[in-house]
Amino acid sequence: MSKSSKPVYTVSEGQEKPSLISGIKTWGLDVLLVLLGTSIFAASTHFFTAPNHIAPGGVTGISTVINYISGGRLPIGIVNLALNVPIAILGFLKLGKRFMIKTLISLLWYTVCVDYLLVPFPVYTNNAVVAAIFGGVLMGGGIGVLMSRGGSSGGMDIVNKIIQRRLPHLKIGQVVLTSDLILIALSMVAYGEVEPGLFAIITIFLSSKALDAVLYGFNVCKLMYIVTDHAEEIGRRINIEMNRGATILESYGSYTRERRPTVMVAVRQNEYYRINKLIYSTDPRAFVIITSATEIVGNGFNRPLT
């Protein structure tokens, strides 16, 4: 192995053990944002989806249908909370306390918002398509905010996490899609119309897009592969000047059969131009491959959701 292919040790950042006060502040911020996200989610239900007979998938959709069938005697929030009790118990056993405590806070606050706080406010019923659009965007945005702080809205979010841990080979997207399609079909039967199911598809689609935008869209990162004869120097400059870690991979060209190490580094969007300048000021002949990373979890980036 050539000298240039030796691994570069990363400069660690933020390794100090967080203080008790810092931990309390972080937890307090988490709870506030979980409440905010849940409030937005509840607003989507009260103002747009429920009054327009849109069952937007998951336990919330089931609760909406049950509320309609009962003639409004069974409140959506209470039904949603009741259906989530066995799922929440399973979640505490399988997913850990921190995640489930935030989820429980979300479930309770959702019930308070939908069944009590938002009841005096008028709902929107002028146009079901508009309701489906705004309902989906608010739903996805609200769930995205609370998930970004390590919580969830309960229901299928918990089930999906458990399935993903126990059966990682299954494609969770297909499981969610299947359950949503079954619920949409049942909602059509319950409402006696096809249109509510079609509107629900719009809501679910826009909700997933809004969720991704909140979780990933504002935290776009770049993953860079740098093929260079100056790997050690570039790695060292990345460590010192960018305060980022770099990994040097041993590689060789399939055509030339020459060994040329590859530097792999992950950076935030706003760091890309600085590191690009750093690379070419060190090696103008460097060959760089840049890809977008929807999420990077670890030191210097996002913290794991627990």
Image (tube, rainbow, N blue to C red):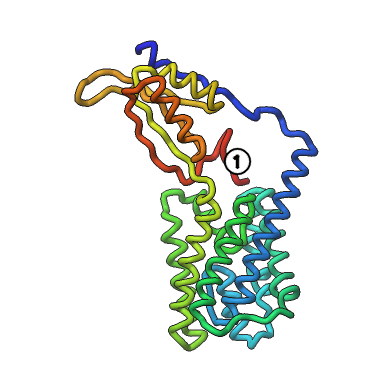
| Residue beneath the point at 48% across and 78% down | 129
Q: Is residue 102 left or right of residue 198?
A: right
Q: Secondary structure at mark 1?
A: loop
Residue 42, given in percent of the width and then of the height, sits at: 65, 69
Work out which quarter of the rendered image holds the N terminus and state it: top left
Asked whether 117 or 175 is in front, the reply is 117
Question: Up-down: is 36 above or below 61?
Answer: above
Q: Quadrant of residue 74?
A: bottom right
Question: Up-down: is 109 above or below 236?
Answer: below
Residue that mark 1 sits on? 303
Q: Is residue 146 left or right of residue 259?
A: right
Question: Up-down: is 79 above or below 235?
Answer: below
Q: Is residue 34 left or right of residue 280?
A: right
| Residue beneath the point at 42% across and 53% down | 170
Asked whether 192 or 238 is in front, the reply is 238
Toward the top, the furthest residue is 3
Residue 211, given in percent of the width and then of the height, sits at: 53, 58
Toward the right, the furthest residue is 21
Question: Up-down: is 65 above or below 15?
Answer: below
Asked whether 304 or 291 is in front, the reply is 291
| Residue beneath the point at 34% across and 23% down | 284
Residue 194, given in percent of the width and then of the height, sits at: 43, 84
* Three-letter residue code for mark 1: Arg
| Residue beneath the point at 56% across and 23% down | 11
Residue 90, given in percent of the width and then of the height, sits at: 62, 57
